[in-house]
Amino acid sequence: QVQLVESGGGLVQAGGSLRLSCAASGGTFSVYGMGWFRQAPGKEREFVAAIGWRAGSTYYSDSMKGRFTISRDNAKNSVYLRMNSLKPEDTGVYYCAAVQVPAGIVVIAAGEYDYWGQGTLVTVSP
């Protein structure tokens, strides 16, 4: 059983930056693919970014590409989401998720993930 705890959310002005962290425990972190998803008020949960075993295997939603960067530190059992040039439409609860995958695989479908954190709220003011 893997437990995930997100942190780093908060209130930021448009154009600002935040770095979200997700700490994992209870499993062998280095064999898990990790993803970030978000859910805005009144909307469906959407994919943000994902990373495979190795930091070089990443995938982004088109709307976040170039502004967001996903990374991981297997020694710290953590995955991060650096968010730059934030917009009010980036407001929402951000969740990290984990799924055990073969090397080189990046998972972008929420339904494929087995473990989820409780989320951290990001609010971007105009």
Image (cartoon, helix red, strand yellow):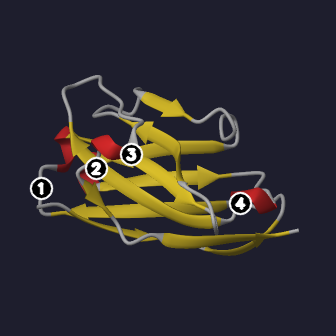
Pointers 3 and 1 in contact (C-beta within 8 Å): no
Q: Hey, what amino acid is under mark 2?
A: Ala
Residue at image mark 3: 110
**On screen, residue 116 above or below 68:** below
- The residue type indicated by label 1 comes to Gly
Q: Residue furthest bottom?
A: 11
Q: Which is more foreground, mark 2 or mark 4?
A: 2
Most extreme residue toward the right is 126
Q: Residue 27's mark?
A: 1
Which of the two marks, 4 or 1, is nearer to us in this view?
1
Q: Earlier in the sequence, mark 4 or mark 1?
A: 4
SS for dot 4? loop
Q: Secondary structure at mark 3?
A: helix
SS label for mark 1 = loop
Residue contact at pointers 2 and 1, CB within 8 angstroms: yes
Q: Which of these two is toward me, 89 or 59?
A: 89
* Residue 5 point in image, percent of width and height: 34, 70
Residue linked to disc 2? 98
Q: Are marks 2 and 4 in contact (CB under 8 Å)?
A: no
In the foreground, 119 or 52: 119
Q: Taking 24 as reference, is 10 above or below it? A: below
Q: In percent of the image, x 23 and y 51: which residue is there?
A: 114
Regarding residue 125, the answer to whether it shows in the image is yes
* First in sequence: mark 4 vs mark 3: 4
